[in-house]
Amino acid sequence: MHEALVPPDSMEGYSEIEILEWKTEFDVVSTLREMGHTVLPLGVQDDLGVLRRASENFKPHITFNLLEEFHGVGVYDHHVVSYLELMKQHYTGCNPRGLLLAHDKSLAKKILTFHRIRTPGFFVVQRGKKVRKPVAFEYPLLVKSVSEDASLGITDASVVYNEAQLIERAEHIHVQTDTDALVETFIEGRELYVGLIGNRRLQVLPIWEMIFENAEPGSPLIATSKAKWDPEYQRKVGIKTAQAIGIAPETEKKIAAVCKRVYKALSLSGYARIDLRLRDDGSVFVIEANPNPNLSYGEDLAESAEKAGYTYEKLLTKIMTLGLNYQAEWRLV
C-alpha cells in the first residue's frame, strides 16, 4: 500500500473524512488478521528496496497488492507488479499487462473498438497542444484524464456543450492532473458497474448502479470525484449505489457477455470492475475498465460480491486464491 495509507490499528478518534483515506487498507488488513493470517502492512512510495527487503525477510506466501501509484505516478503501478513477478512473488489482483492496457484509457478504447465492443467515440488533447475538435464529434462531450482513475478531475463541468467550455475543461485537466485530456461523446443513461472475478474462468457479479435521488433536473448524472468520495455531498444529492433493478433479462445477459469480452481483450486477471452506460433503448456502452478496484467493505464490489454469496472474508480469500494460482510467465519456465 502507499506509504501514507498504512492504517492505524483502530478507527477510534478519526473523522469520517480521515477514515475514508485509508479505509480500504484498514478493512483488508484487519479482516485478514481476524481470519488468522499473519499480515505485514508495507508502505511503498518511491523505493523498491523496501519491497525486496520485506520479501526476503518476511517471506510472504502472497503479496496483497493495494498500491495505486509509485513515485506519485498512477500508471507506474504496473511496474511494481512487474517487479513482484521478477522476484517470483505471488500477488493479488491484476497482472502488469492488464494494468498497463486498462490505465491508458485511449489505448484501451482502441483495443475495445478493434474487438467491436461499443465504447463512446473519443479524441485526445495532448498537454501543450491546441484544442481541435474533429468535425465528426457533436456536443455534449465529456472531458477527463486519459490515465487517472477514481474520477480525479471530473466535476459537473466536465460535460461541455460548446468550444469555450471544451477548451477550459481540457486545460483544467492538463493543469490539475498533469495528464493529457480524453474527450469522449457523452452518453445519457444509467451509470452501471459490473464486478468480475477470475483469471481464465470468469464470474460476473450482479450489476450495480449509481443512483442520484436528489439531482437537479437537467444536471448530468455522472460519477464525479465528489459523487464518489465526498460523504456530505453524497447525502445532499442523495447519491448511493445499489443493485440495478428493472433491466430486461436479455440486456443483463448482453451486459455480462460484453464485460467478459472487455476483461479478456484487456488481459485482465484477479478482479476488476467494468463501468458502463445503459441508454433507455437498451444500448450498452463501455466507459472504462478498472483493474484492482476499490475493495473497501461496504463499497460496490464487496456489496455486489455479497449478493453473489461471498462474505467479505470469502471475497478476500477468493482474491488470494486467484493470485496464488495465476500462471505468471516465471511459473511456466
Image: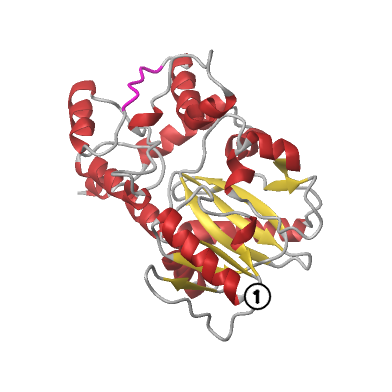
Residue 179 is left or right of residue 71, and the answer is right
Across and down, in percent, residue 285 comes to: 63, 65
Across and down, in percent, residue 161 comes to: 66, 71
Quarter where residue 58 is shown: top left
Q: How many marks?
A: 1
Q: Nearer the viewer, residue 158 or 267?
A: 158
Q: Amino acid at mark 1?
A: Tyr
Q: Residue at x 67, y 66 (%)?
A: 187
- Residue 135, placed above or below residue 19: below
Q: Nearer the viewer, residue 131 or 333?
A: 131
Across and down, in percent, residue 25 comes to: 45, 28
Quarter where residue 237 is shown: top right
Is residue 31 within the magenta segment? no
Q: Residues within 10 Å of mark 1 (few under 14, many from 20)?
A: some
Q: Residue at x 40, y 46 (%)?
A: 94
Q: Residue at x 56, y 29 (%)?
A: 17
Mark 1 falls on what kind of element?
Answer: loop
Query: Can you identify the residue that label 1 sits on?
Result: 139
- Residue 292, placed above or below residue 261: above
- Residue 123, placed above or below residue 6: below
Identify the image quadrant of the N terminus: top left
Q: Is residue 118 in view?
A: no
Q: Residue at x 69, y 47 (%)?
A: 210
- Magenta residues span 37-42
Q: Is residue 72 in view?
A: yes
What is the chief secondary structure element of the magenta stretch?
Answer: loop
Is residue 38 within the magenta segment? yes
Quarter where residue 240 is shown: top right
Say how the picture is coloured: secondary structure
Across and down, in percent, residue 167 comes to: 52, 71
